Image (cartoon, coloured by chain):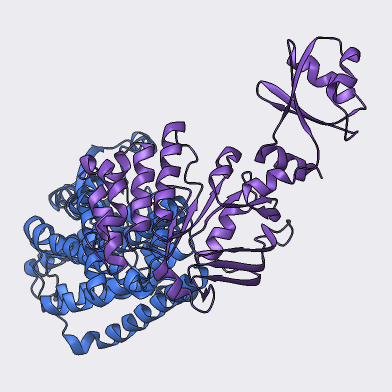
Chain colours: A blue, B purple
Amino acid sequence: MNTLLFLLQKEYRQIFRNPTLLRMILAIPVIQLTILPLAADFEIKNINVAIVDYDRSTYSRDLVHKIESSGYFVLVDYNGDPKASFGYLESDEADVIIEIPEGFERNLVRENHEELFLSINAINGTKANVGGGYLSQVIQDFNQEIRADWVFRKPNKRSAIAEMVTINRFNPLLNYQFFMVPGILAILVTMIGAYMCALNIVKEKEVGTIEQINVTPVKKHLFILGKLIPFWTIGVFVFSIGLFLVARLVYGIIPVGNVLLLYAYLSLYLIAVLGVGLLVSTYSQTQQQAMSLAFFFMMIFILMSGLFTPIEGMPAWAKFITQLNPVTYFIEVMRMVVMKGSSFEHISRHFAIMLGFAIFFNSWAVWNYRKTS
Amino acid sequence: MNNVSLESIAKSFDASKPPAVKDVSFEVSDGELFGLIGPDGAGKTTLFRILTTLLLADEGKAKVAGCDVVKDYKQIRKEVGYMPGKFSLYQDLSVEENLNFFATLFGTTVMENYDLIKDIYVQLEPFKTRRAGKLSGGMKQKLALCCALIHRPKVLFLDEPTTGVDAVSRWEFWEMLKRLKTEGITILVSTPYMDEASLCEKIALIQEGRIMSIDTPMAITAAFPKELFAIKAENMSQLLNSLRDNELVQSVNAFGEYHHITLVKDSGTPDAFTDRLPMAIEWKTIEPTIEDCFIHMMSA
């Protein structure tokens, strides 16, 4: 026990003497968590739209007003020349071109039917999809309004309108950041845990100090504990700064669920992640190797975790990989507890799986560590 | 029981290459200052790593302080001190912190064994709050020695302790080893410098993983089979070439100011061929050094 205390004392001393490391521990949660969610915002605003109006009637102007006032669109041109408008699409000045055909109002009133032509720049699929979706909604609204208008004018000619009412549960304002921030925080904690732990151990190998330790009677498990505990505390520290300082003050995210439950899961999760770091260190002789190996795993962990793209939309084999990724479970738990307020019984499966990961990675690492030295 | 013994130790790292050490056997008695002498890549570090339980030998048995290096490795780790060839203490910890840290790992304190390291530590004391990485080469080496001694080991392994250290510090270091010997510590030291061999009580000459000879330095030089001559002339490189072409000369080696030669005939002297050389020479009979013996054995 005494030996462990001295090992820890030495480790903390080295950490506190490493200014770069200290700055990273502070800068990662504060700066990255402030910047990244803004970049990972899928909400699309300021869609540039050019309108070619051949009709120039009251209805067509009403429609243009409605599009303009929705807040999502910026009108870059309004004219009657189709060639000029298509040029906007080519030069990337407009994302959408709307063509209102001649006789729009007349046909709508007489034949109760008219077609609009939308031309969308689909290089950015997401933007095209979302922009097209917004636009359809605006046009549908417009449609309903004029119908209601007619019903009001001719009360005997009633037409039934079924309206859909949607309530957004758990994130009423559809704030994208509420969804991204907890997920990104989970990733940051993962990177810090795995990278720092792996690099620190490999540095001892590189410098040769690990040999100097190996010729002493220090037990292997004490040495490993002496490495894991400091990085476990750093992980908890980074998480706390991210949760209480950045998420709360910058984004106004206050976990709906129990914070202690979140910390309980974090504790277990960090053990699993540090196990990955330890494992990487047992397979690397130099910090460069460790860095490349950790980078390889991190890319998979991040992109296959459901952070940016929903897992439900992935093909079956990719879904299978996400199930083998510990980050997936932590992001899920973060979102469940922070946004939905899930309690222990809802995430007990996640606890069990993470316990499995922790045992698996650490046993593998310790087994390989024994074998090589 | 502070002795060390090896019995046909062999180790190879890559099956396609010749083994790092092969069939190495020798014994070091209690309290002896034993030198492992050989060039870079001869297998000195491999042997030390096997004896300090950092590496498992493929074949053979070895005992350190009465304990088997495989079965009783835990006991050995309590009783040996190891100073690797490369400085491997914590560069970001101070002199004092390094020393205290290693003392606690061995379950002891600096004060308990202070008398053993006192002579060395007094030179380090002015820098005790300095980070180990910021020490000069000689100071680093002294600190490493202190850390290897802090638990009063029975056997001390020093892997090339004087490599990269200036001449004055090298002799100081050997003085320190002699003092440690009086404490009854068995010391194994490896070095590529042949001139240090005569400072050991017993030496093993090692080359390409095999031991060529084990004896006291005196006995090894005495066993040199021929009479040895040192020859000097104005133009040394011309002399070297003409000596090599001379059929009376058995071996020629450049040794700084002189060329060392042995002759084919046992009773001859260089006078026998001075008239056949293109220049005037100066010669004398000399006592062979360890280096002469080493070169002789290598070519044999």
Residue B34: percent from left, percent from top: 55, 54
Front position in the image: A304 or B296 = B296
Label total for image: 0
Question: Residue B88: percent from the left, percent from the top?
Answer: 40, 51
Query: What residue is rendered at 69% in x and 47% in y?
Result: B220
- In the figure, is residue A363 to the left or right of A171? right
The answer to whether any part of residue A105 appears in the image is no
Relative to A225, residue B251 above or below? above
Q: Is residue A234 above or below residue A203?
A: below
Q: Quadrant of the C terminus of chain B?
A: top right
| x and y percentages locating residue A367 in the rendered image | 47, 76
Task: Identify the residue at image location x=54%, y=48%.
Answer: B200
In this view, the residue in front, B276 or A27, is B276
Give the quarter of the image for residue A3: bottom left
Residue shown at 88% from the left, 35% from the top: B266
Q: Of all residues shown, which one is farthest toward the bottom? A: A345
| Percent of width and height locating residue B231 | 75, 21
- Give A7 or A99, whichever is nearer the viewer: A7
Is residue A264 visible in the rendered image? The answer is: yes
Judge whether A287 appears above or below B151 on screen: above
